[in-house]
Image: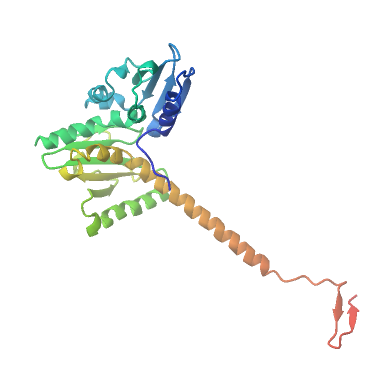
Amino acid sequence: MILLQAANKVLEETLRERFKNDQPDKLVMNASDFDGVSYRLSTPENKNILQVSMFLPCFSQVQQFGADEVLRRIYGDLVVAPEPGFDVTLRIDHAALPADKEPLIRQISLLKRNALAAPFEAAFAAQQAGSETSLMQVKYREEESFFIKGSHDRVTVIFSTTFKEETDKIFGKVFLQEFVDVRRQASVSSTPQVLYTAREPPLELQGVPGLKDSDDVAYVTFVLTPRHFTKDTADEAISRIQLFRDYFHYHIKASKAYMHSRMRTRVEMFLKVLNRAKPEIPDSKKEKKTASGKTFTRS
């Protein structure tokens, strides 16, 4: 199993290596992330001016919930007019880099996470103010969305997910049932409540247009209470819950790969047993011995 990170590893390592050099080279590089997100790192003006651009399929939706304000707050004057074909562009002057470059590298590699954080921050702020938000929908994949609603006592986050294969539905149901069961243990009773429904959307989504009515669709609901998004834990909560869908389907695929490898190993073992069990074919020309020790050849 791997540990998925909210930061894009390609961006992080590329920037760290580039910022080490006093005289950086020209650069044109494309990279990808989960959910159809793509990046472009380039030096269109000169070698000292680096542009980092991101295409986020659902950016127009998160803009409605304050994504521009969140990015301005985090990146400040680095945010410039986006390149054609992209939604966000950051402009970094190599000559104006801070002495400690790691925080900047970290924040740039979290560009996708920070853009998607806007509806979460809006819901958290509404709950802390004792008010409510409308249901915020972000269609982050072609057939999948997540929904966020802030209430006076909780924040509800709902993921819709589509299973492409019948076996994926079986694995998914088993995993999600474990979420429900493990919370009953005293050691993890403080974790968010998790609810799972297949095909039928939860009550919070009743009346939402465009929901797919199919056995291939499931809904996972997280109920966050104020202790889950305090001042010290809110950022980590946002990062972790954004990765839920990727982790969920990754574990399904990893489990299927593990079972396939076990089946191949078992088949190989059975073949070895069968090969050892084959009777020896007698050779008619081979010498034989009698009980008295005399030898003869069968004709």
Residue 94 percent coordinates (x, y): 39, 18
Classify residue 288 by image quadrant.
bottom right
21, above or below 299, in the image: above
Residue 184 showing in the rendered view: no
Q: Nearer the viewer, residue 244 or 283?
A: 244
Which residue shows up at 49% across the image and 18% down it? 25
Where is 259 relative to 89, above or below?
Answer: below
| Residue with the most extreme front position | 99
Image position, residue 199 (x, y; %): 29, 45
Q: Residue at x 10, y 39 (%)?
A: 152
Query: Taking the image as drawn, is residue 129 in sight?
Result: yes
Between 170 and 71, the one lying in front of the other is: 71
The chosen color scheme is rainbow
| Position in image of residue 166 (x %, y %) | 41, 49
Query: Is 285 displayed left or right of 217 in the figure?
Result: right
Q: Quadrant of residue 37 in the image?
A: top left
Query: Which quadrant: the C terminus?
Result: bottom right
Horizontally, is 196 left or right of 226 in the view? right
Front in this rendered view, residue 81 or 106: 106
Residue furthest to the top in view is: 45
Give the farthest residue toward the bottom: 292
Residue drawn at x 27%, y 48% is: 197
Q: Is residue 1 above or below residue 265?
A: above
Taking the spot 85% from the left edge, 85% from the top edge, the residue there is 290
